[in-house]
Amino acid sequence: MLNGYLKVRDACPVCDEDLSHHRADDGPAYLTILIVGHLMAPLIIWAFTTFRPDPMILASVFTVGCTALSLYLLPRLKGLIVAFQWARRMHGFGAT
């Protein structure tokens, strides 16, 4: 469905479904922030209280972790949003 990292193809290469009228917009970014925040915040608190690392080490490790998790989740959540719109026949997907 995706052509590149976040670009949605105009049509599905398998079934030729028109995907040009999707409206993913900022939804994937909001969901990514929500998921990463809810996963990493408890881990940061746990790591700080359990191991008491130097603040720069803690910040460096969790900055890399948050960035990697965000980059992993973003295209998958964009695909999820477009698939949800298709399944619910939103934004012109149900038009014949």
Image: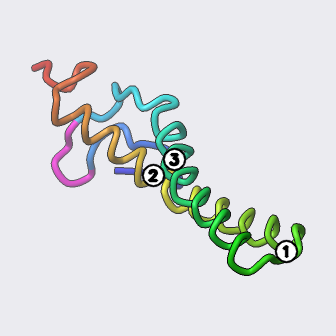
Classed neighbour count for the residue bearing mark 2: other residues with Cα under 10 Å, few (<14), some (14–19), many (≥20): few
Depth check, front residue: 16 or 59: 59
Q: Main secondary structure of the magenta part?
A: loop
Left or right of 5 on screen, residue 19: left
In the structure shown, which secondary structural element does the residue marked by tag 1 occupy?
Answer: helix
Name the residue tied to disc 1.
57
Q: Which residue is mark 2?
A: 3
Residue bounds of the magenta highlight: 13-17
- The residue at 27%/52% (across/down) is 13
**Label placed on residue 32:** 3
Q: Position of residue 1 (x, y in %)?
A: 34, 50
Of the two numbered discs 2 and 3 in the rendering, the one whose residue sits closer to the viewer = 3
Outermost residue, bottom side: 51
| Callouts 2 and 3 close, C-beta under 8 Å | no
In the orientation shown, which residue stands out farthest toward the front? Answer: 49
Whether the residues at callouts 3 and 1 have beta carbons within 8 Å, the answer is no
Q: Is residue 71 visible?
A: no
* The one of 31 and 71 positioned closer to us in this rendering: 31
Disc 1 crowd rating (10 Å Cα; few below 14, some 14-19, many 20+) is: few
At 26% from the left and 31% from the top, the residue drawn is 85
Q: In the displayed structure, would residue 5 be above or below residue 22?
A: below
Residue type indicated by callout 1: Ile
Mark 3, Cα crowd under 10 Å, few <14 / some 14-19 / many 20+, is many
Identify residue type, mark 2: Asn
Q: Could you give the CA–CA distance between mark 3 and mark 1, rounded to whole angstroms?
A: 24 Å
Q: CA distance from mark 2 to mark 3?
A: 20 Å
What is the distance, in whole Å, between disc 2 and disc 1 at their CAs?
37 Å
Q: What is the secondary structure assignment of the residue under circle 2?
A: loop
Say which amino acid is labelled 3: Thr
Residue 19: percent from left, percent from top? 30, 35
